[in-house]
Amino acid sequence: MEWIRLKAVIIKEFKQFTRDRRTLGLIIVQPILMMTIFGIAFGGEIRHLPVVVSNMDKSIYSWRVTHKIEQSEILDVVSYLDGYENAKELVKKGEVRGAIVIPKTFAETLTNEKKAKIIVITDGSYPTFSEMIIGEVQKIAAEISEELTKELASSTSISVSSNNVQIKTYSIVAYGANLRNIDFTTPGVMGLVIQMLTMILTGISVVREKEVGTIENIVASPLQGVEFIFGKIITYLVVAIVITTNVICVAIFGFGVVVRGSLLDVFLVSILFALGTMCLGILFSTVSRNQLQAVQTTIITFLPSILFSGFFFPVESFPRIISWLPYFIPLYYYIEAMRGIMLKGWGLAQVTNQLIALSIFTGGSVLLTTRVFAKKLD
Amino acid sequence: MVEYAIETKNLTKKFGDFTAVDNLNLKIRKGEIFGYLGPNGSGKTTTTRMLAGILTPTSGTAIVADIDVTLNPEAVKPKIGYMPQKFGLYRDLTVYENLDFYGSIQSIPKQKRKEKIEELLDIVKLADFEDRLVGNLSGGMENRLSLATTLIHDPEILLLDEPTAGIDPPLRKAFWGLFSELNKKGTTILVTTHYMDESEYCDRLGMLSRGKLVGVGTPNEIRRKTYGGDVIEIHIPESVKFMEEVLNDIVEKYDEVFSIFNLRKINEKETIANLIVDNADLVIPRLYRFFEDNKITNFSTKKVLVSLEDAFIKFTEE
Ligand SMILES: Nc1ncnc2c1ncn2[C@@H]1O[C@H](COP(=O)(O)OP(=O)(O)OP(=O)(O)O)[C@@H](O)[C@H]1O
Ligand SMILES: [Mg+2]
């Protein structure tokens, strides 16, 4: 690599970039627009949240409860155990999203007082999931209460209100309380916006030169392939920094999200992620024949990113046959790292694995791009 | 010192089943202007691209500036100036910025680059437009700028793919003036064109037809090769039958008269015919003598200058 040539590419890319009003708009206006739309639009059905069940009662009543929990579409019982503290520990460790504990006195209080309680322990750093688990257990409790009331009425032929059975849930938040839904979803929204914008911008950068014919002069010159690619990457890195800053600002000032960890860490991880998706975009651009193909390839990657990154559905709840999928999705690592830093106050040291994974994506795409980019027309 | 600037051996390019360039053996001498002619789709651009090292040949070799392009295309690139047929400069950069970019990627240091750009802008008469966006240039200006960028690093060899396509006659003339100036300084130039008048300025021509080289030589050699000799025209105020008899006698009598063609009558009393002869300047005086001996008067005869256009059509029609 020679600096004079690399610099020439960087200067050229910058000029081209700043002269195109649309792309300028894309990096200023789009992040705000997309963040807002995604922020509002986030929702959707959640299923298969992994939970543990601790049935300390072991009566016919409590078996009815666990049976219903097993049948739930939302809850996914991963194991059974005995005890309260060890169930809570599993939630704290993040191995499951919730624990349902049926106390020893369940059957006793139910027969004597027609009252009972179920304890639900959830992870507060995932408020959406917490709410869903609690809601589901509440629903089950209500159903059983009603069934028992009916059974009681038919056996005694009396129907007075004092005979109503009441099973209540009692919820305990094991971790990171006081978080709102938006705090939890924001890392995913940020990642998705960064990924979309950087990939769309870089996705056409190489293939456009092929389409308008400027590549013919480039390949016939002594400019090296790596200089051409790195010149583009360096330019787009600056662009990515602008986009990322914009996105973080919207998250903090627009959404008012909590950042428990360091803001600098949020920024650094986001830049690394942006760099990775950018290089992926350049790779797609290099292997595409025309701009349409490049844009299509880019768009095709969005769906798996949304579905399998843990953005909507917790990765732990995936069926085994696709459980390996998230490992191939950069957004998965970004969301994990950002939830750690933003919600749990982690530092960079605690997200090393994610940083390594993102670096591998970045390095891998750059390496592949320089390999694939041939200074030829055929 | 190798004699040839460009030398190809059985250079072939196939696109699938289609052979665009077929076993090409081209030799271009150092310091020569070589005109590369051929109808649309005959493989001129394909050849030029292979010589520029940007298209991989299917088979064969090409030595350009003493380097084997097939083995080491990157080593060739600093030595050549390639002007593609399709304009390929950045439309969202200005004239100056494009030259500066191409100068930089040729690793020309800043100060020298600046001087060279000024010089080139003067040569191609774009000095007044250096700040204009290339997207806003006229077609002729585009060609001038494109040519200037290929000259920025003073290449030994120029590969120009239809540099004069679509530009006005004065500018075409200026381009050829520039080519011959560069040529005088020792630059070897391969130039493709569809304009036959331009090929007169070339030292040698190569005629390409369906990927095959069908004729190579100086413009005069090409002319002679068209019919296999010089062409003369004879005009006699007599009938076709009479003319035919006379000409048959001539062909029989003189070895250096090869054949008759294009015998045609103008009206009842006048006939014209062409003869292909070895050397028109020697044959014509003999014909005069022959006509005198046979008491034929009122005839006229002259050497016909075969146009390169005819040559081109004849060479490429099969
Ligand atoms: N990339 C390609 N793929 C398939 N066929 C190609 C390709 N490039 C050129 N050809 C074909 O090869 C043949 C020669 O093309 P080429 O461009 O070399 O012709 P040319 O002599 O430059 O023509 P023109 O005078 O129109 O510029 C044409 O039939 C063309 O369609
Ligand atoms: Mg061509």
Image (spheres, grey):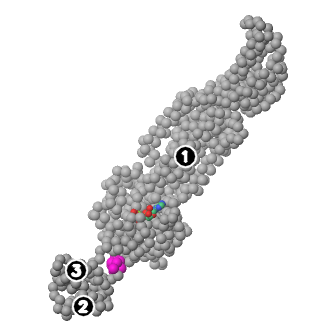
Q: Is residue B165 left or right of residue A316?
A: left
CB atoms of marks 3 and 2 within 8 Å: no
Give me the disc on residue B155. none
Q: CA distance from mark 1 to mark 3?
A: 70 Å
Tell me the element at label 3: strand
Q: Main secondary structure of the magenta part?
A: helix
Badge 2 and badge 1 in a common chain: no
Residue A139 is left or right of residue A299, and the answer is: right
Residue A208 is a magenta residue:
no
Please name the residue that numbered disc 3 is placed on.
B272
In this picture, is A113 found above or below A135? above
Circle on res. A297:
1
Residue kind at label 1, given as amino acid type: Thr
The label shown at residue B286 is: 2
Q: Is residue B44 visible?
A: no
> At numbered mark 1, what does the secondary structure look like: helix, strand or loop?
helix
- Which of discs 3 and 2 lies nearer the camera? The answer is 3
Looking at the image, is mark 3 or mark 2 earlier in the sequence? 3
